[in-house]
Image (cartoon, rainbow, N blue to C red):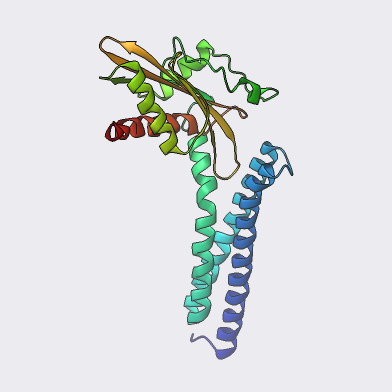
Amino acid sequence: MALTFSSLNKGARVARALAWIGLVVAIASGVAELLAGLGYRWGWWHFRTGLSIMRWAATTDLAAVLLTLLATGLALKFGARRIALLAVRGLVLSLIVGGPPLYLYREVNSVPRIHDISTDTDNPPRFVAVLPSRKGVENSTDYSAEVAQLQKRGYPEIAPAMLDVAPLPALQRAERAVRAMGWEIVAVAPADGRIEATDTTLLFGFKDDVVIRVTPNGAGSRVDVRSLSRVGRSDFGTNAKRIRLFMQQLEAAKAGG
């Protein structure tokens, strides 16, 4: 039976309502995601509260995906092209909003739940200069055999860099790499072959500390790196990723001398 004008009109109104509701829910979810991290940066709540807000925002955003999908289908069925375009825009926005939480969920379930990564799991570099800044933080600088085992299973590729230059030039190269990474340098101690720095994550503004140790290795040098979060049991793979990027930058820093 052919659809009547009345049913077409009613179907279009339903599609329009669903499209607008979905769009508003997607926008609200996106704002909540941004505030989840910014609220922690601004001292409004604990970071775990922020993570809970992000989880709830992701759940709400799923409703936006379903609403806009349904609105798109109805709009196309009843020939309401403008409403279909509105619904598609809401769908695209809801998918974008859902991306970051899904990424974090995938990361936390695919990496070891640790927050301390070192290229030397037998004798990790020790923090010195950043210790005053870490007073009262959740995570200790103590290193455990359990963490070492979890890292070896989860990040077997994390290893020191072997350079064909003496320790002092190697330390200078490492410092150039640190500056290129945009980390805040806390200390450069040539006598100890040590650099300490702090990196701040984008959304939540988590402070993670890094220590780089340069030691002689035959005619060259060995560069070890340790990256440690101040808070949180799991780092979502951030510290390992930071070390990998530093190693790439260290290789690129050869061009500087």
Q: Residue at x 60, y 65 (%)?
A: 22
* Residue 96: percent from left, percent from top: 50, 57
Q: Quick one: quadrant of the C terminus?
A: top left
The residue lying furthest to the bottom in this view is 5
Residue 159 visible here: no
Residue 185 visible here: yes
* Residue 3: percent from left, percent from top: 52, 85
Relative to residue 162, is residue 25 drawn left or right? right
Nearest the viewer among 45 and 156 is: 45
* Residue 136: percent from left, percent from top: 70, 23
Indicate whether 215 appears above or below 183: above
Relative to residue 153, is residue 135 drawn left or right? right
Nearest the viewer among 17 and 54 is: 54
Q: Residue at x 58, y 71 (%)?
A: 19
Nearest the viewer among 251 and 108 is: 251
Indicate whether 155 appears above or below 56: above
Q: How many marks?
A: 0
Q: Residue at x 46, y 32 (%)?
A: 110
* Residue 197: percent from left, percent from top: 52, 28
The residue lying furthest to the right in this view is 44
Q: Residue at x 61, y 62 (%)?
A: 27
